[in-house]
Image (cartoon, rainbow, N blue to C red):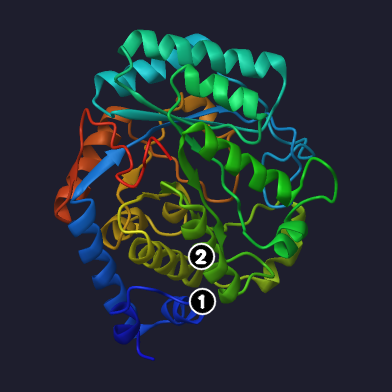
Amino acid sequence: MSVQSILQQTEFSKSDIVELLSSEGEEKQQLFDAASRIKLDNVGNSVYLRGLIEWSNICRKDCYYCGIRRSNHRVHRYSLSEDETMDAIRFAYEKGFGSIAIQSGELQSRSFIEKIDRILTKTSEMTQGRLGITLSCGEQTEEVYRHWFDLGATRYLLRIETSSEQLYRKLHPDDEDHRHATRLKALESLKKIGYQLGTGVMIGLPFQSVEDLADDLLFMKRTDIDMCGMGPYVEHHETPLYAYRNLLLPLSDRLSLSLKMIAVLRVLMPDINIAATTALQSIEKNARMKAIAIGANVLMPNITPKRFRDDYFLYENKPLSSQNDEEELRFLEEQLQMIGHEIGFFRQGNSLHYQPQR
């Protein structure tokens, strides 16, 4: 079946999705054009900002792909102070970002949880609840998730990395801290509590097939997510997975496949929020704008204090701008205008797919 014929359907099988992800040339452009139309029809041409605060690179996990894994002793570890965090949040609020995203390595200590508690409380007080708050702080108990929700965090991003348990096992140590079932249970808890639920996968991993990626997309639709942050796998030389770099697609192919994943997800779930992630930009400078043009509607400018950004080093070639945060914001606005989009300043940009009472 041709890509054009598949796109005219209302339901998509796994084989349909594999076909879309395998498209090239004119058929790939047909996919991109369809996804662009669907996005504009359902979520419009506004792009919502999430001021990204890389809050801490201290992590209890030892994932084989990640540069800040526990066993990488060459990492300079840090956690932002409350003052540093609140300064970044104040900048986002005053400049009209509408939302922030607090991302960190995974910890479950009482001191870690209480620090997040205080940041959430101070943010709600400072902004009178006007600033949207996304947390991406890994696996926690349902009690902790509920507590953070009550303190004002309305969105949670927990990347599944892959929906395949078999592939997941190849990416993580075989111990109680790295269980696929635990990840799935955490997503269920977040959804039950009432968060706008976000997840995502890495694209172009060693051992990963196009069929795996099709399953990932079907998993996201079945889980009924509200937002997605996914991007290309980019290797890091201080990780065990680096030994399998000979199995990787070229970076340009990983970028192309990532863009097709974004486009297909937009076709499958027309009204969710999809981020154009920083990892795209690590391969090609203009890749985030390409993602916006064919389906994404969220950008996450990094507003972490500059002196810490080198230390949140998940993968090679992490893009670091020489501009200050205000200059970077103006640059993004100009780039978006060139492709017929605008920043939704002072708007939280909540997922239109989200239903508060599930």
Q: Tell me the amino acid under the disc marked 2.
A: Leu
Q: Residue at point 72% right, 20% down?
A: 109
Q: Is residue 238 visible?
A: no
Place of residue 157 in the rendered image (x, y in percent of width and height, measured from the top left)? 51, 40
In the picture, measured across the screen, residue 33 lies left or right of residue 263, that is left
Which residue lies most toward the right here? Answer: 175
Q: Which residue is mark 2?
A: 218
Q: Which residue is mark 1?
A: 14
* Residue 341 higher or lower than 151, as above or below: below
Q: Residue at point 41% right, 47% down?
A: 227
Give the image quarter of residue 324: top left
Q: Quadrant of the C terminus?
A: top left
Place of residue 68 in the rendered image (x, y in percent of width and height, measured from the top left)? 67, 39
| Nearer to us in this view, 84 or 195 | 195
Instruction: Tell me, yes or no, whether the two marked residues, 2 and 1, touch with CB atoms within 8 Å.
Output: yes
Place of residue 163 in the rendered image (x, y in percent of width and height, measured from the top left)? 62, 59
In the picture, measured across the screen, residue 309 lies left or right of residue 7, that is right
Q: Residue at point 48% right, 19% down?
A: 150
